[in-house]
Image: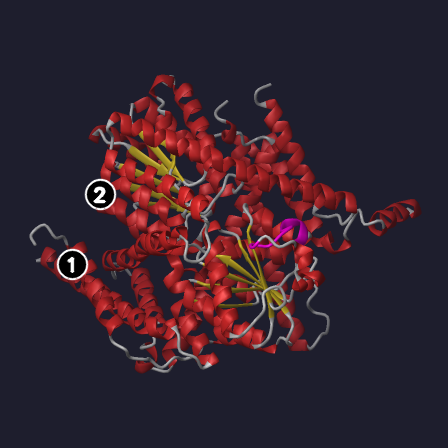
Amino acid sequence: MNRKVPLAVCFIFGVVMFIQYFSQHPTARFVYKSILDYWQIIFAFTLILGIISFVNNNISQIKRGNNTFYRIVAISGFLIMPVVALGWGIKTGSPFMWMFENVQAPMQSTVFALLAFFVASASYRGFRARSIPATILLLSALIILLSRSNIGGIFSDYLPNIADWIRNYPSMSARRAILIGIGLGSLTTSLRVIIGIERTWLGKD
Amino acid sequence: MYSNIVIVDAIVNTGWFDITTLSTLIVSIISIAIVLYTTYHRKSRDKFKIREIAGLKAVENAIGRATEMARPVLYTPGWGGDIQRSTTIASMNILSYVAEQTAAYGCQLVYPTHDPVIMTVAQEVIKESYTHSGYPDRFRAEDVTYVSSSQFGYAAAVDGMITRLKPASIFLLGTFEAESLILAETGNSINAIQIAGTDSTIQLAFFIVACDYTLIGEELFAASGYLSGDKSILASVRAQDIMKVLIAVFLLSAVIWETVATISGISGGSWWMF
Amino acid sequence: MKHLKSRHWIFLGLFLVIGITMILNVKLNVRVSPYTQKMFDYIDSLPPGSILLISFDHEASSLPEIRPLALAVLRHAFKKDLRLIGVSLLSEGTVIGYRLMQKTAKEYHKVYGKDYVYLGFRPQYVAAILSMGESLKETYPQDYLGNKYDQLNLLKSVKNYNNIDAVISIADGSLTTHWIEYGHGRYGVKILGAVTAAMVTTYDPYLASGQMYAMTGGLRGAAEYEELLKISGGGARGMLAQSSAHLYVIFLIIVGNLSYFITKRKGRK
């Protein structure tokens, strides 16, 4: 019973969503629109779940003395932003906007910028001409890198064209093949879930 | 025959069926039929075998390593997906297997995520797996945590966990975006053994460079059948192969037709672009 | 100094390369790619009064890269007297999108409600995209500022995607894929993308198949767009730093390979 009800609900909604795609009838549109509305409402409620878990987890870790400093910073950030937003609003010039622009945005940009540093270290380590395929990959990477920087044109006018060719033919066909595989994988996984063969999302049997 | 036409006509005219979606309907029915046939036709499904997937074979070694080093295992599904995404569901299947192993070895399993629903489902999956392994008391709910919905908030939190906890093994399986290399390189810097897999073609390139094993696209979807050995799940992998062959035949026919049509100047040669 | 590993030296080198080139005020010549040209030509060809839906599908983290790109596209649209509807599928992008629209609208003396509106954020992006395809009014009964949908002049003639010429997704992740799969796939709306450089290759297959109509990407895309608009902006300024970082990575790859071959040779001996 514990599992049968969610499996039945999953099957019914899966089939309804599949069938409605092929219909423009007002009833089908109404059912579809209602499901979309509920989908958004349910999603908004799940955020509460996240907040409760976040606060609970951090407080219990503080009590245990586990990374207390980091936990306090996390809880402070979590409390300060909504309090400031509720107190002074979120208009231009408000303390919330000041903190968003001068604290949150630069911190997030910094983490994003780490990507450039990691690309550099990964390239140094990963791009080695160990074999013929690895050498081809290496040369392709060099051509693309040169062409994506504006200096590429200095070496040869053909370089950007060669880079476009690599992007549009060998690289694109490989990616398309992977995409087709992923698409089919998604389709069969979804069907397995709708039919009820795939049940891991409900926990183990 | 006439009455059939009248019924079809009535369905189309009243708007119950949108005729513009006919081609999608046909392709969908063929795909569903193939999946159902391969799943429920016992004779053919029992013969089917799946090739070895190196990344999945390494799962047990990775957990064994963590146990020997007395360090935790970190598993995260990436920032890009939500629970309805098939990659997340596929990742849950692998998580279930990993959790069974960590329970049996008595190894700590840490699972940070960006989505509250994924967190709840993961808690349930891990708890059930621990019970299934016979060690329900080893399950710690606080190890499955929601960290942040923000992409780089999540990346920073998981990076922090990696540098502080120093897990011996890291599983990056799910939907990843720009955070992929940040996490994989941080894992690499602490010499963790890393098994990754995603459906994003661009992030796959990053994972291949920075991780020890990478599940490429559909290998992730085949994982649950591979790990559990469940015949009906493995059968859907066979369905994928059949559909792939059909797509290849279709593409080839379209290319030949279009080439011949262009050379000989036949008009209306694009029937395949339905 | 002793505890620094090769990784740390690489990081330090990159920091210096970018830091130094950011200080230099050198403008590189920009060759406009066919990708950006197509996007520019499409927006340029739209008659005044056409409606574009701009979706700010990014977070604050990618602002240094996204901002020049978004500004260039918005300036072009306002310059051509197009009408814009702004939305956001990520909560963090909401306020950023509003401010970018406000800033560019001011530059071109555009009036809120008549020339542009900002509807704001809706949670669950897939549901939001599908829902807008059914009814924009039911998805957004009021705008970001709290005005009722029917009170806004621009929106009076807009029911769903059928009344919109194209959607431009300004994104730092894979949200544009959802616009392609659900917005274009289900409702047939034209999708254009202004995305970060890391995401450009992800969208190549969709661009080639026509599921995505046009795309421009990264600082380079912004620089190309600025070149076409004949304005100076953040794209052109950032190109020197980006180009020098590319050269630095090439240098690292060469050094990495040299050390690999030297070690291999020593091993043989």
Q: Is residue C71 left or right of residue A197?
A: left
Do discs 1 and 2 share a chain? no
Question: Residue B274 appears at what percent x and percent y?
Answer: 69, 60
Q: Nearer the viewer, mark 1 or mark 2?
A: 1
Q: Main secondary structure of the magenta part?
A: loop
- Taking the view exactly as shown, the residue that stands out farthest to the front is A88
- What is the crowding at mark 2: few (fewer than 14 residues within 10 Å), some, or many (at least 20)? few
Please identify the quadrant where the N terminus of chain A is shown.
top right
Amino acid type at mark 1: Trp
Q: Residue at x 53, y 72 (%)?
A: C39
Q: Residue at x 63, y 63 (%)?
A: B254
Asked if the magenta segment contains residue C141, the reply would be: yes
Q: Is residue A125 left or right of residue B253?
A: left
Question: Residue C135 appears at what percent x and percent y?
Answer: 68, 52
Which mark, by number, is residue C267?
A: none
Front-most of C134 and A76? A76
Question: Residue A138 appears at what percent x and percent y?
Answer: 30, 64
Front-most of C219 and A140? C219
Location of residue C68 (image quadrant): bottom left
Of all chains, the one bearing label 1 is C
Residues at badges 1 and 2 in contact (C-beta under 8 Å)?
Answer: no
Q: Which residues are magenta?
A: C137-145
Question: Residue A147 appears at what percent x and percent y?
Answer: 36, 73
> Considering only vertical position in the picture, is C111 above or below A71?
below
Q: Which residue is mark 1?
A: C9
Of all chains, the one bearing label 2 is B
Q: Which residue is mark 2?
A: B191
Regarding residue C80, the answer to whether it shows in the image is: yes
